[in-house]
Image (tube, helix red, strand yellow):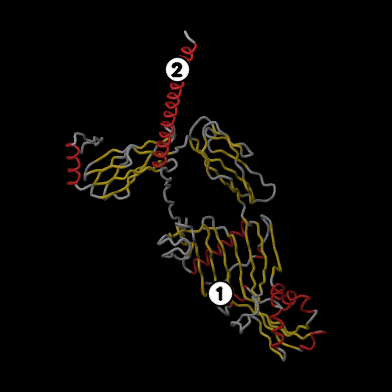
Amino acid sequence: MPEKERESKALKQLEESNAVRVWLMRGVVGFLGLIFLGGIAWGANDLLSRESPQPPAEPLHESILDPPKTSTEILSYLNEAIRFAKEERPKYNAETVFTFPGIEEDSPAEGEGLTVTGSHAEKIKTAFRLAAPELEEYLSGTVQKQETEYGGDFVPYLLPVNAGATDFSELRCEFIYYRCEACGKEEGEPQEVCPDCRAENAYKIAYRDNYTITLVFAPDNAASKAMFPPRSAEEVAALLGDEVYDRFQARGITTSTDQITVVATVNRESKKLLALHYQKKLHVGLGLAGKAALEPLGAFDLEFNLLEEIKNDFTWPAVHISERERTMGRNESAMLSVRLDAPEGAEVVWKSSDEKIVTVDQQGYIKTGKEFGEAQVSATILVNGREYTDACAISVRIPAEKIKLSHRKLSLAPEERAQLEAVISPAKATNQTVTWHTEDPAIATVDKKGLVTAHSPGTVTVYALAQDGYYRASCVITVKGAEAWHEKNRLSLSSGWSARRKIPPRS
């Protein structure tokens, strides 16, 4: 065979081979493209079919017992909480804080600011006003602290409220508030429009864990004077200190108290007293005469107010496990930790309510077994002869991850029925329980097995909730008028096709 003919034949074979490779490559790319697009479509459909979990609304717990309402009930409740604290003796911390309210530039409101009388009264008041920041810092601050450990005796420092309901101008027990469901802003009263997120009618009633009890004594009340006698001249002199006595000669110190308020915080469930604060205004009057370089000021009388607050705070023994609940598979292990409010060296005792489900050692190391089920792992401490416990709920199961319905949309006629099927994934999820709901039973209802019955024209969402995880899947039901439905089905039949659905016979 001539050389040129052989070259031509080889070139032709090469071209054919390249063409085969090109078509093969195109086929592979096309196939992969179909898989890729199919994956995107499947993923998008799966994503669109998923809805946010919808846990049931938590019930509103006003209180285990009725909250105190009348003045007598509020006062009795507070004194009972004080008595209980004295008996149980939690950790106690107290401090007495004085605050100087400052000096007004203009004429102060009645009972506020600084009053000076004497031959150089205006100059002296101007000097005090110029030195107001330093004076405020000097006269304000904590002057006394008390502290006892768990089981300590703080009874001498804790004043009971020895007064009757008529001794107060105001008694309040507060625990109700309103919360914007859109942004979480809290208010004492519901607002038509949230000032933060501008949501309308979004405030819902809510309840705090603690009562805030406020008692305001009536003016010039004998009970308040007995509970909170004015500070002595010696106590005021100690408060003024050497900074004043090195510059002035003091005389005739007088004191009086008014605007006395008691504010307490009590846990609603346990009735444990968490805080008890006494607030009062201390009015001080005294005569001063300048010494040395200040002698030209002469003698003058000075009156001022101090805000005094005695803060009694309580820390009760408690165990806090790091998790309130945990879902685990079979033959898995994990570690729980605790935070203690307890005396140093308190021993934690761990326990499982069902060791077939989960075991726990004395370091908080937990391990599940071969069985599915629920169990409680608890941690307990002993303080002053009383046990304090916290627990973590352990659920051993294969958790549900999503739920899907057989239809996302259905069109029905009045009184027509259709069966919806719910599928939970993964198929091996331990809890396959589903509950069915309709948003408007006047349009369509659904029974506990997913059977939908149409009633009147309109559009309504019927949805299923997985009991595990509260995953939700919905179907939009459109109920047409009878004439429109018959016309649709007539056209469908005339075009040579019909849409069949599984509709159980009417009973």
Height in image: 438 above or below 427? below
The structure residue drawn at horizontal position 61% and vertical position 69%, both measured from the top left corner, is 278
The answer to which of 54 and 274 lies nearer the viewer is 54
For disc 2, the marked residue is 12
Residue 468, quarter of picture: top left
Height in image: 155 above or below 219? above
The answer to which of 263 and 291 lies nearer the viewer is 291
Residue 368 position within the rendered picture, expressed as x and y whole percent measured from the top left: 55, 33
Question: Marks 2 and 1: in contact by CB < 8 Å?
Answer: no
Q: Which secondary structure, mark 1?
A: strand
Q: In the orientation shown, which residue stands out farthest toward the top? A: 1
- Specify which label sits upstream in the sequence, 1 or 2: 2
Q: Which secondary structure, mark 2?
A: helix
Height in image: 211 above or below 341? below
Residue 464 position within the rendered picture, expressed as x and y whole percent measured from the top left: 36, 42
Disc sitting over residue 494 in the figure? none
Q: In the orientation shown, which residue stands out farthest toward the bottom? A: 119
Q: Residues within 10 Å of mark 1 (few under 14, many from 20)?
A: many
Residue 70 position within the rendered picture, expressed as x and y whole percent measured from the top left: 47, 68
The structure residue drawn at horizontal position 54% and vertical position 45%, both measured from the top left corner, is 324
Height in image: 190 above or below 224? above
Q: What's the residue type where badge 1 is placed?
A: Phe
For disc 1, the marked residue is 217
Q: Residues within 10 Å of mark 2 (few under 14, many from 20)?
A: few
Q: CA distance from mark 1 to mark 2?
A: 111 Å
